[in-house]
Image (cartoon, coloured by chain):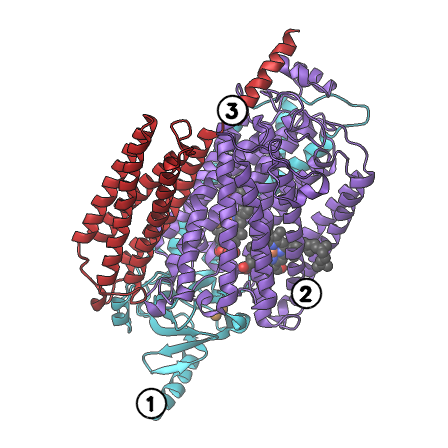
Chain colours: A cyan, B purple, C red
Amino acid sequence: MPITSAIIIFALTLILVLGGLWVGQNVDLLPLSASENAPVYDELFKVLFSIGTILFVGMVGLVIYSLIKFRTKPGQSGDGIPLEGNLSLEILWTAVPAVVVLFVGLYSYDIYDRMGGMQSLSHEGHHSQELINEKRIWGGISSGSVESSSQESITSLPIEVTAMQFAFLFHYPEGDIISGELHVPVGKPISLTMESKDVIHAFWVPEFRLKQDVIPGQPTILNFTPTKPGRYPIICAELCGPYHGGMRSTVVVEELEGYKAWFKSNAKTELIES
Amino acid sequence: MTIATPSESLQPSGWAKYFSFSLDHKVIGLQYLVCGFIFYLIGGILAGAIRIELTSPISDFLTRNVYNQVLTLHGTIMIFLWIVPVVNGAFGNYLIPFYVGARDMAFPRLNAVAFWLIPPAGLMLITSYFITGAAESGWTAYPPLSITTPAAGQLIWIVSVLLLGGSSIFGGINFIATILKLRRPGLKLMQLPMYCWAMLGTSILVVLSTPVLAGTLILLSFDIVAHTGFFNPALGGNVVVYQHLFWFYSHPAVYIMVLPAFGLVSEILPVHSRKPLFGYTTMVYSIMAIVVLGLLVWAHHMFTSGTPPWMRLFFTIATSFIAVPTGIKFFNWVATLWGGRISINSAILFSCGFIVNFVLGGITGVALAQVPFDIHVHDTYFVVAHFHYIVYGGSVFVIFSSIYHWYPKFTGRMLNEDLGRFHFLITFIGFNLCFAPQHWLGLNGMPRRVAEYDPQFEFVNQLSSVGALLMALSTLPFLWNIFQSFFIGRIAGDNPWHALTPEWLTTSPPPVENWKGPAPLVTAPYGYGAVTNTEAIKSTEIKNDLEENN
Amino acid sequence: MTTTTSLEQTSQEQNEQHEAHGDYRLFGLGAFLIADGMTFAGFFAAYLTFKAVNPLLPDSIYELELPLPTLNTILLLVSSATFHKAGQALRRDEASLCQRWLIITASLGLAFLASQMVEYFTLPFGLTDNLYASTFYALTGFHGLHVTLGAIMILIVWWQVRSPNGRITSQNQFPLEAAELYWHFVDGIWVVLFVILYLL
Ligand code: HEA
Ligand code: HEA
Ligand code: CUA
Ligand SMILES: [Cu+2]
């Protein structure tokens, strides 16, 4: 290979890689991030986006270049070069993708671990421990707290979620509150134990980057720590019948005082009523 | 001892044969193709209904139940009645006997039966919409939803999918037997055109995975009819087991939809770039690697179903690795183009469009395979975008490419190239306009299978619908081209592309038993550029030349 | 001149190759049985998963009686051997001996079905009682369906060997061989089923 074309290829590859990295770092395609694992997710997204851009632009570039460079020009006839293969090239393009996917796999394992996905699902202080023992718990994302060193975040706030056609119900065992909206204090680890009454639903909060199916007959768990006050949609993400599209709720993330106030006012009425 | 061959049994001729129980593999192939295309138009009209509904955030054009029925029918028709029968049945039946140097498939009668299962199954599925209401639980039919929705439509859905599965299994057995047993003496496996390898791999997948779907659907129908509780948690059943069984078939099914397309591209690219297929041997191995891996990755559809962490990880890694053999194929195709003498015609444009679209779909696929990534976008429009990039941008583009490539062989006439390039342009633009924005929708919070959505997504959805409209319009020049060229197209001659694969070494259209004389022995189907072959191409009627190679 | 002869030869060769299709049918059947086996594999997988992850309520655990199914296993295994004998007899052109073995095989198959019925009627649970019961009936029922089909096939083969200008002879063994392959397959499935359902 002539030295000039080697340099050109090297330069193009460098531009492609740097360009891809730049694009990956600067895209803004995701909604607001409002839980402790959302920034971790966004980090993974950026890496995947960079790799994807590099591969895609590279492949498309090669195809378009070949179509232009090697098209039959007027007056040309005959065949192309009778090249049937090239072992070192083939090894190269087996090895590079293999390394890339291995890297992606290990990296996303790390991300998943940091999101708490690899932690065991049993956790102390959970109110519905009996429920969990009696029925098998079916996974979900475990601890949502990335830095669970601070005292407060060690005990998580347990909430029971019931899904049915076509609504979510939230039950706070501590105050025996039943609510159609999920109220949570900012910065506190939340632990949802979810079960469905009829068909499969899914609990999804795009701003938290978390989703977990809510399955009849098999409780699932979803843990997270909200980080930004606000109202975010809870969306049912599993086809559950005609009103699937309308099966929505809201999670209200408040400062601790606001949450306490809400809790008190509701727990009280509950207590009076019962 | 003998099995009837087309010449032995009296077959109707002329137009009538395409409506008969013909045993000729070429007739059956075209029956599959035309029948599949009709179902494509129906599935496309349903897609149109979906896109019209989604131009506004409220549920207005279709009622909510009807929307679910429409999307179930759309998915089922497009997969089971369009892509699978066409990339396997149509081109497989037409081409495989040529490629192995045989005069027909191994089991012509079984072949005809396999085809004739399809129209009744399809009709049943579609009429269920008008009579009882169609199934409304999506093409995945997850219980308990599929047990609690109206039973009649769901049962009809099950029966027709079972029939189509049976058709697919019969076809698969036939392809395996034809490729392995009916090869012309003297032809080695490693000399077969790549499409044979693709079909061999696909058929193995069909035979191993389709029966599991059949068994699962039988259990599901028991739950509906006899009130057993296999998948009904109210009766102690387990819904996640259904998902495992379903995806054990339906993940391999995606390779059943795309491996044959890979094979077809491998036939088309060398012809129009006048170069040998790059890396034949690695292509063969990567097909087989995809077959093996394809059977081991099903649970990537269930990352949010409450699968245990170790299972999620295993399936992440296994799924990601499919990118390696698939990547080999893509790089080999680009290397096939590289240094060629490419004619920029409709066939090559659609093939290159396929490469571009599929790479994007594949990259989003690898992203989806990462558990933490998938947890956010599972069951959203991101997934819808992923698979349309692959099934439409991949398989459907390849089908169009193949029609442009083989139409001269089917009919003896050329298609109009200008119309073809125009078709490509509109399809490519419309397709990307329709599905690229859906990635954004999914990332930002629009779930799939909904008839109503947040107003903030309205504009992007309308954009997508405009793309769908362009795709629908782009069908018109294509249909017109097919129709008019049949009557006034330029006469193609036997081998208009100067191709070396055996189907071109006979008349267009070919005679009943494929060759007037003996079957040619083609040991170098991709021998472009080699001196002997260049000479061979110069005389298109080279049957005798080729015989000398014996 | 030489080319023409070679052409004719090949075309003859081609025609021969084209018409001698018999072997491929058995190959095709083999492929079909692999597919059929996958259906069973799906059922077995479902059963084992149910058993592993859906702990049954106390009152839905049954001790299955072993004698009858063990007898059934023996019946089927013996019938595989007798079918084999029938095939051997046909190959030696001993049609009447072949018929006798076929009848014995078919009777063994029918005996299996009868004793399966007896078991069904004596079991303490019905199809829809619980998950375990449903899977039990689904598995044995699907297998029983295969045995029924097999028995019918054997009787057809028997009839065709018997008829004077019978279509099944040592020259045309395919129907018998196909039925035999199928029967061995059904027996093999039963053994797996017996181990998984009754012994595990
Ligand atoms: C023909 C159909 C087809 C094909 C071929 C594929 C191919 C792939 N698919 Fe896709 N998929 C579907 C059809 C298909 N898919 C459908 C229909 C669904 C939705 C079902 C439903 O729920 O209704 C789906 C859903 C789906 C999911 C589940 C998403 C979810 O529901 O949450 C996942 C997750 O892993 C996935 C992954 C992949 C991967 C990794 C590939 C890989 O095979 C892709 C490999 C290809 C490439 C990667 C590109 C080329 C390679 C290179 C250029 C080399 C370099 C690349 C790298 C190093 C990355 N697919
Ligand atoms: C396998 C192949 C395949 C193909 C080719 C297509 C093709 C198309 N699909 Fe499909 N789609 C699926 C498989 C496929 N789809 C599956 C499996 C699902 C999931 C179902 C489920 O969730 O269960 C799905 C779901 C799906 C959705 C998501 C629905 C939802 O989740 O709510 C959408 C939405 O935009 C969509 C759109 C389209 C469009 C616009 C096309 C277009 O490409 C179609 C273009 C073609 C035409 C339009 C035909 C031309 C017809 C004419 C010229 C006649 C005149 C017609 C008109 C004027 C409209 N599809
Ligand atoms: Cu609940 Cu969708
Ligand atoms: Cu998949």
Task: Using the image as rendered, state which of residue A171 and residue B58 is in the foreground.
Answer: B58
Residue wearing tag 1 = A271
Mark 2: amino acid: Ile
Q: Residues within 10 Å of mark 1 (few under 14, many from 20)?
A: few
What's the distance in space between the residues labelled 1 and 2, CA to CA? 50 Å
For image coordinates 26% across by 45% down, the residue present is C108
What's the distance in space between the residues labelled 1 and 3, CA to CA? 79 Å
Q: Is residue A231 left or right of residue B60?
A: left
Residue B115 coordinates in the image, percent (x, y): 57, 45
Q: Which chain contains the residue that carries disc 3?
A: B
Q: Is residue B496 left or right of residue B247?
A: right
Q: Is residue A249 left or right of residue B550?
A: left
Q: Is residue B215 visible?
A: yes
For image coordinates 21% across by 52% down, the residue present is C198
Residue B166 coordinates in the image, percent (x, y): 49, 48
What's the distance in space between the residues labelled 2 and 3, CA to CA? 49 Å
Q: Is mark 3 within 8 Å of ligand 1?
A: no
Farthest residue, direction bottom: A272
Residue wearing tag 3 = B190
Tell me which corner region of the image, top left, top right, bottom left or bottom right, holds residue B530. top right
Q: Residues within 10 Å of mark 3 (few under 14, many from 20)?
A: few
Farthest residue, direction front: C164
> Does residue A200 lie above or below A82 as drawn?
below
Same chain shared by disc 1 and disc 2: no
Mark 1: amino acid: Leu
Query: Does label 2 or label 3 sit earlier along the sequence?
Result: 2
Q: Is mark 1 within 8 Å of ligand 3?
A: no
> Does residue B516 lie above or below A146 as drawn?
above
Residue A197 coordinates in the image, percent (x, y): 39, 73
